[in-house]
């Protein structure tokens, strides 16, 4: 698969007298492709250098941010991002995380020949947010699909994620009586503003069909998406749209659709996000999101057996 090279990959060539004798390419942390010139052509083999996996359990308390808390507990940023990904349907890590929240995580620590390589999979996690406990266990179904489930076998995946972009801060919450910062008059703020640097990727909060891509008054560059059950989401003040995005296109949850900007009536770079049900603006932080079907029958029995440890 030499047509699938990525920036940063290392290929080592063996050249003698201007003749290629072979080369090596790292396929993964545990596999290396070795190509060697033989009398009748090139011989290939994959050399396997297994990884050592150690399962660790770590916990911590939020002081200022999840990143700082995981770092204080000796974890790298990948674990913090994974925790946020796991609970993104239940917790808005921009709006809702507060000092005193706690986390526990069971994860794999990867090493090779005694050298630490980084964190592997998160096997289980717990996050206590505002006194409410959320738990997740990683599980592979018989079909091969992997996901995270509550200890009762309910999928954590829901129709919408709580926040359409990763870690940042909130500059303005849902408020029907806000004084507009540009117009200096009372104008309802029927959404949430996420202050973030220009160019920060914005994700579709749910699967649906793009209904509008373009400029719209004070919103500046805006994208609107129609979802099932008469739900519509709006993403405003974007600096630009994702390449090729067009009205009528169907997109999946989590796909990058645009980038944070400050077009339209905006005093600084931020994303303006709205969640609309049957034509009525709703505060997504207070909306109960529809759940996926829970595991049942033999699938639930298999999960309980695997999740018990």
Image: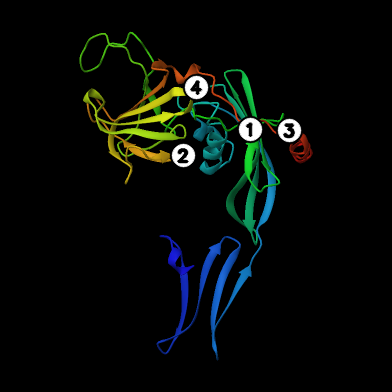
Q: Quadrant of residue 281?
A: top left
Whole-percent x, y for residue 79 in the image:
56, 41
The residue carrying pointer 1 sits among few (fewer than 14), some (14 to 19) or many (20 or more) residues within 10 Å by Cα, namely some
Q: Does 75 appear above or below 133?
A: below
The residue carrying pointer 3 sits among few (fewer than 14), some (14 to 19) or many (20 or more) residues within 10 Å by Cα, namely few
In front: mark 1 or mark 3?
A: 3
Question: Which of the two labelled residues, at mark 4 and mark 3, occupies the earlier sequence position?
Answer: 4
253 displayed left or right of 186: right
Q: Does 44 appear above or below 234?
A: below
Q: SS at mark 3?
A: loop
Q: Which mark is residue 155?
A: 1
Residue 2 or residue 127, whichever sits in front: 2
Residue picked out by circle 2? 252
Residue 36 or residue 205, whichever sits in front: 205
Residue picked out by circle 3? 296
Q: CA distance from mark 1 to mark 3?
A: 11 Å
Residue picked out by circle 4? 96
In front: mark 4 or mark 2?
A: 2
In front: mark 2 or mark 1?
A: 2
Q: Quadrant of residue 146?
A: top right
* Residue at the image point whose x is 46% and y is 77% from the top: 13
């Amino acid at each position: 698969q030499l047509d699938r090279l990525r920036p940063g990959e290392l290929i080592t060539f063996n050249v003698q007298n201007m003749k290629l004798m072979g080369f090596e390419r790292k396929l993964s942390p545990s596999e290396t492709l070795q190509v060697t010139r033989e009398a009748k052509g090139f011989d290939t083999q994959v050399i396997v250098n297994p990884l050592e996996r150690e399962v660790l359990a770590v916990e911590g308390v939020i002081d200022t941010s999840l990143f700082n808390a995981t770092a204080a507990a000796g974890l790298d940023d990948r674990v913090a991002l994974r925790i946020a990904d796991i609970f993104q349907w239940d917790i808005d890590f921009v709006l809702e995380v507060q000092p005193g929240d706690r986390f526990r995580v069971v994860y794999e620590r990867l090493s090779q020949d005694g050298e630490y390589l980084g964190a592997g999979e998160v096997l289980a996690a717990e996050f206590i947010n505002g006194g409410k406990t959320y738990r997740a266990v990683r599980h592979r179904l018989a079909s091969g699909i992997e996901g995270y489930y509550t200890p009762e076998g309910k999928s954590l995946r829901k129709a919408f994620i709580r926040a359409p972009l990763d870690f940042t801060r909130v500059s303005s919450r849902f408020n029907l009586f806000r004084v507009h910062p540009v117009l200096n008059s009372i104008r309802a703020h029927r959404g949430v503003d996420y202050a973030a640097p220009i160019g920060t990727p914005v994700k579709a909060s749910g699967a649906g069909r793009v209904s509008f891509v373009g400029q719209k008054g004070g919103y500046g560059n805006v994208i609107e998406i129609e979802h099932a059950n008469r739900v519509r989401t709006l993403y405003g003040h974007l600096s630009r749209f994702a390449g090729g995005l067009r009205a009528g296109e169907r997109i999946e949850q989590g796909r990058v659709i645009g980038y944070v900007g400050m077009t339209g009536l905006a005093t600084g770079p931020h994303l303006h996000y709205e969640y609309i049900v049957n034509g009525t603006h709703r505060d997504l932080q207070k909306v109960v999101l529809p759940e996926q079907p829970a595991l049942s029958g033999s699938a639930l029995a298999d999960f309980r057996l695997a999740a018990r440890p």
